[in-house]
Image (cartoon, helix red, strand yellow):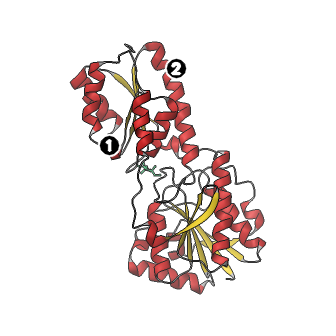
Amino acid sequence: LNKIGVLTSGEDAPGMNAAIRSVVRSGLYYGIEMVGIKYGFQGILDETMGDMKAASVGSIIQRGGTILQSYKSEEITTNHGQQKAIEILKKHGIDGLVVIGGRDALKVAASLAEKNYPCIGIPATIDNDIPFVEETIGFDTALNTIIEYVDRIRDTASSHEKSSIIEVMGRDTGDLALWSGLAGGAENILIPEKQEDVEGIVEKIKNGNPRDKRYSIIIVAEGCVSGIDLNTKLKEEAGIESRVTVLGHTQRGGAPTGRDRVLASRLGGYAVDLLLNNEFGKLAGVENNKTVSYPFNEVFSQKHHINESMYDLTGRLSI
Ligand code: F6P
């Protein structure tokens, strides 16, 4: 390979910049020309791209968001859009691509690879919902952001003996709610994978806490039920008034944690290694502290699952 492109697509995640930096500098180290593609896959179609040098990625390792901007392109999800993208990449002499993003982005990368275009995926999403991948870039930062707010809210909830509902992200996956619930000592956790618990929570709260604790922290993933709707339900059915805090985009921003910077740097370097070894159509990950790759077709034949024993543990600890 002579020229490699890199892009970020879909929702941003802290650590994407650290991954871009690592991809660009690893490629340059091996004498490859590196191209940054702006606005995700749409940037291929619109040809918004430019050469990247070592200095182009200077002082970005600590910054949240993505210097390459992100975008959700509709056109790239079509067969025609993908063919067109490959033609444009070839026209620019770009003979390999590193895609940094979540599920939707990685699925497009998989489609390009299926069309025989050399493509490697780097999993970056705060949701941690990529099958096989132990941890995605951005998850640790978002988790720590949530924990900080949960701690603050607990101070005031316990002082005033008021319950608090904290809505966190997770359209389809409960990892952020589950991990932050465990780490923040939440009394109740509601996640999309356990939709049935929404009914159960009213009963649980009505029955009260055996220790007669007069407040509780309820963490709810937005994909399960909205904090506002849950509050209405608790008010109507249990006569409980809660404060609702929607953490929203605070969870996606901010400086990446050390763990995310290290993960992003490792995966960036490894993605370039894979391309240079002619190993295409793969997703880069870390397993047992070793970089590993998974063929795209295997990844997307699976579903991400929450850790059931961790979920059970949260129940045991909230007595
Ligand atoms: O990054 C993914 C995600 O955090 C989902 O969990 C969440 O549902 C979504 O982003 C929300 O993003 P937005 O409100 O910007 O659509």
Whether 302 is drawn above or below 157: the answer is below
| Residue named by callout 1 | 194
The answer to whether any part of residue 145 appears in the image is yes
Whether 117 is drawn above or below 48: the answer is below
- Tell me the amino acid under the disc marked 2: Asp
Residue 6 position within the rendered picture, expressed as x and y whole percent measured from the top left:
61, 69
Residue shown at the point (29%, 30%) measured from the top left? 201
Disc nearer the start of the sequence (1/2): 2
In the shown orientation, is residue 191 left or right of residue 14? left
Residue 273 position within the rendered picture, expressed as x and y whole percent measured from the top left:
67, 72
Residue 221 position within the rendered picture, expressed as x and y whole percent measured from the top left:
39, 41
Please rate how many residues cluster around mark 1, counting C-alpha atoms within 10 Å: few if below 14, some from 14 to 19, many from 20.
Answer: few
In the shown orientation, is residue 280 left or right of residue 233? right
Whether 206 is drawn above or below 111: the answer is above
| Residue named by callout 2 | 155
Secondary structure type for disc 2: helix
- Quarter holding the N terminus is bottom right
Residue furthest left in the image: 237
- Quarter holding the C terminus is top left
- Tell me the amino acid under the disc marked 1: Lys
Q: Nearer the viewer, residue 262 or 233?
A: 262
Residue 227 position within the rendered picture, expressed as x and y whole percent measured from the top left:
35, 35
Q: Marks 2 and 1: in contact by CB < 8 Å?
A: no
